[in-house]
Image: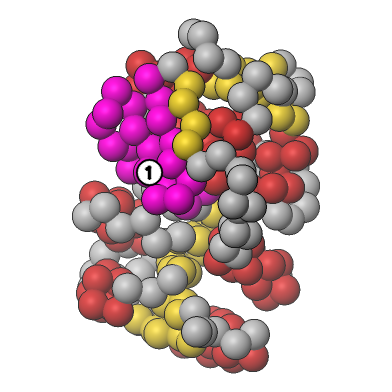
């Protein structure tokens, strides 16, 4: 079944370019030209991914993103920012966005990021373990559930993929390159602080178990069973 991408953007020309290219790639599209219709469509249509502009009439993209996350929506979100300075805010304000692109962006790169976010993890082999425990942290690959001391932790798509990679490789150092390749799936060229931001929010969300994720300076990260 075709995946649906919701475009929330007030510049008609950009909406048309995105629609044209997404449809050509086989996606269904929905569009909202302001910050009120955007979240409404996200709620009623439950799209598979949202492209979200920052500067919008009625409500800005940061607030929309935070609102959707506060409603426990885990739909992957790519923020479209107009200025370099805005991109720090995407993660700095803990909006819950999964990725961002600075305008003017390359359509090809945007499509690559959309594909990467929508790519479903391959079916695990039947004999592969589905449950992972590390300290009081519990991960269920089948239900995508993450719990700390039995309490469910709500993660965004990328945060979950990141934690899954670290937990399924517990005790082994996972390099930054491997994480960027596996979780983001594209060449990130100098934007690897996206990874640091995700590690930061992941640690915060895991609360007392956040310290299980250890930084291996200049190399990557490792998940240990002991804090
Ligand atoms: Ca705008």
Label 1 crowd (10 A; few <14 / some 14-19 / many >=20): some
Circle 1 residue? 145
Q: Nearer the viewer, residue 29 or 48?
A: 48
Picture residue at 44% right of the left edge, 17% below the top: 135
Q: Is residue 5 left or right of residue 187?
A: left
Tell me the element at label 1.
Answer: strand
Q: Residue at x 57, y 16 (%)?
A: 224
Q: Would you place residue 223 above or below residue 97 in this image? A: above
Q: Is residue 84 visible?
A: no
Mark 1 lies within 8 Å of ligand 1 (Cβ measured): no
Location of residue 77 by image quarter: bottom left
Q: Residue at x 60, y 64 (%)?
A: 119
In the figure, is residue 194 to the left or right of 176? Answer: left
- Quadrant hosting residue 218: top right
Magenta-span inclusion, residue 148: yes
Relative side of 39 to 138, left or right: left
Q: Which residues are magenta?
A: 136-160
- Residue drawn 30% across the image and 58% down it: 73
Question: Taking 157 as reference, is 11 above or below it?
Answer: below
Colour pattern of the rendering: secondary structure
Q: Is residue 216 above or below residue 204?
A: above
Instruction: Decide if residue 211 is in sight here.
Output: yes
Residue 107 sits above or below residue 76 on the image = below
Looking at the image, the residue that sits furthest to the front is: 127
Q: 165 or 24, which is in the foreground?
A: 165
Residue 214, x across and y down, in percent: 58, 17
Furthest toward the top, the residue is 227
Of residues 128 and 137, the one drawn nearer to the viewer in this rendering = 128
Q: Is residue 81 magenta?
A: no
Q: Where residue 220 sits: x, y (%)?
A: 70, 26
Q: Residue 215 location in percent, x, y?
A: 63, 18
């Amino acid at each position: 079944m075709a995946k649906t991408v919701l475009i929330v953007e007030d510049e008609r020309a950009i909406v048309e370019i995105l629609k044209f290219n997404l449809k050509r790639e086989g996606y269904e599209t929905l569009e909202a030209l302001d910050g009120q219709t955007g979240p409404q469509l996200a709620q009623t249509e439950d799209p598979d991914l949202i492209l979200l502009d920052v500067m919008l009439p009625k409500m800005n993209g940061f607030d929309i993103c935070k609102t959707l996350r506060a409603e426990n929506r885990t739909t992957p979100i790519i923020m479209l920012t107009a200025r370099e300075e805005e991109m720090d805010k995407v993660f700095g304000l803990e909006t819950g966005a999964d990725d961002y692109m600075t305008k003017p962006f390359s359509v090809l790169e945007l499509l690559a990021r959309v594909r990467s976010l929508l790519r479903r993890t391959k079916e695990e082999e039947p004999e592969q373990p589905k449950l992972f425990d590390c300290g009081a942290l519990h991960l269920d690959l089948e239900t995508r559930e993450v719990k700390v001391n039995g309490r469910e932790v709500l993660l965004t798509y990328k945060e979950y993929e990141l934690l899954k990679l670290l937990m399924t490789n517990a005790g082994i150092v996972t390099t930054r390159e491997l994480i960027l390749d596996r979780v983001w799936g594209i060449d990130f060229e100098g934007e690897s602080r996206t990874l640091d931001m995700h590690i930061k929010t992941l640690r915060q969300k895991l609360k007392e178990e956040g310290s299980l994720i250890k930084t291996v300076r200049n190399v990557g990260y490792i998940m240990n069973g002991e804090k």
